[in-house]
């Protein structure tokens, strides 16, 4: 059984991964929520809990390799790979392109699970799926902790997210929180995030 949504949200709030208020996001848009996944993953028990959901979902998918995009996906990928007891690697963005470095390899025919922390546009995941295809390996699935795509992304493999968290954003001039007289905070500007 999947972890109840409210239970996951409580963990996000408790660890301050999810902040509620009035924020200006890096895109310039305003939102009543700000989410930083790394804040919850710093706690081993929650890393274990959330990654356990992904590992459980793909337990019988004959996964032979886990691969994640750096940096955000590495912590989650490593934990899922450890739980599934399979080799685990990561790809990193060099000159704007996701690549395998450090001698990492995807072997032909291998069943590969792609793991990420947060999927918004899915860009990094799609690039890794391409790496899997180029290696003549097989895609076992895509697993991630939080789906922020508002249901817009369709991966061609089985995909699973621990939590779907829709993002409601506003243009500053249309922001209801601004209209109430509030000021949007930039979460990154304090050096805390
Ligand atoms: Zn606003």
Image (cartoon, rainbow, N blue to C red):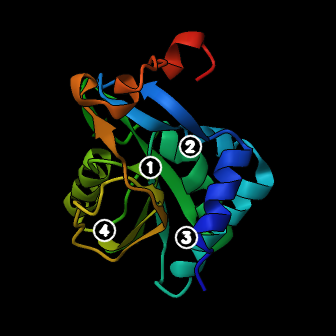
Residue at image point 40% right, 30% down = 177
Q: Which mark is residue 118?
A: 1
Eyeballing the image, is 40 above or below 21? below
Q: Quadrant of the N terminus?
A: bottom right
Mark 3 / mark 1, whichever is N-terminal: 3
Closer to us: 96 or 32:
32
Q: Which mark is residue 37?
A: 2
Q: Which is in the foreground here, disc 4 or disc 1? A: 1
Residue at image point 24% right, 67% down = 155
| Residue density around tag 1, few if under 14, some if 14–19, many if 20 or more, within 10 Å | many
Distance of label 3 from label 1 (alpha carbons)? 13 Å
Residue annotated with mark 3: 54
Residue at image point 22% right, 60% down = 152
Q: Which is in the foreground here, disc 2 or disc 3? A: 2
Residue annotated with mark 4: 108
On the image, which quarter does residue 10 sit in?
bottom right
Kindly tell me whether mark 1's CB lies below 8 Å from ligand 1.
no
Closer to us: 5 or 54:
5
Q: Position of residue 95 (x, y in %)?
A: 25, 23
Query: Judging from the image, what secondary structure is the residue with disc 1 in?
Result: strand
Kindly tell me whether mark 3's CB lies below 8 Å from ligand 1.
no
Kindly tell me whether mark 4's CB lies below 8 Å from ligand 1.
no
Q: Can residue 17 be seen from the camera position used here?
A: yes
Mark 4 / mark 2, whichever is N-terminal: 2
């Amino acid at each position: 059984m999947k972890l109840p949504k409210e239970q996951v949200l409580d963990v996000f709030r408790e660890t301050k991964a999810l902040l509620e208020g009035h924020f200006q996001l890096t895109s310039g848009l305003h939102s009543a929520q700000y989410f930083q996944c790394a804040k919850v993953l710093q706690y081993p028990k929650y890393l274990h809990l959330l990654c356990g959901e992904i590992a459980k979902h793909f337990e019988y998918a004959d996964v032979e390799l886990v691969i994640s995009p750096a940096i955000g996906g590495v912590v989650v990928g490593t934990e899922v790979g450890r739980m599934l007891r399979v080799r685990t690697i990561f790809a990193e963005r060099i000159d704007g392109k996701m690549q395998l470095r450090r001698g990492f390899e995807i072997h032909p025919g291998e069943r590969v699970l792609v793991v990420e922390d947060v999927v918004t546009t899915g860009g990094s995941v799609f690039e890794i799926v391409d790496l899997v295809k180029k290696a003549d390996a097989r895609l076992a699935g895509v697993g991630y902790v939080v789906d922020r795509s508002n249901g817009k992304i369709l991966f061609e493999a089985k995909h699973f997210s621990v939590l779907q968290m829709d993002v409601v954003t506003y243009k500053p001039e249309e922001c209801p929180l601004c209209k109430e007289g509030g000021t949007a905070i930039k979460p990154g500007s304090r050096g805390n995030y």
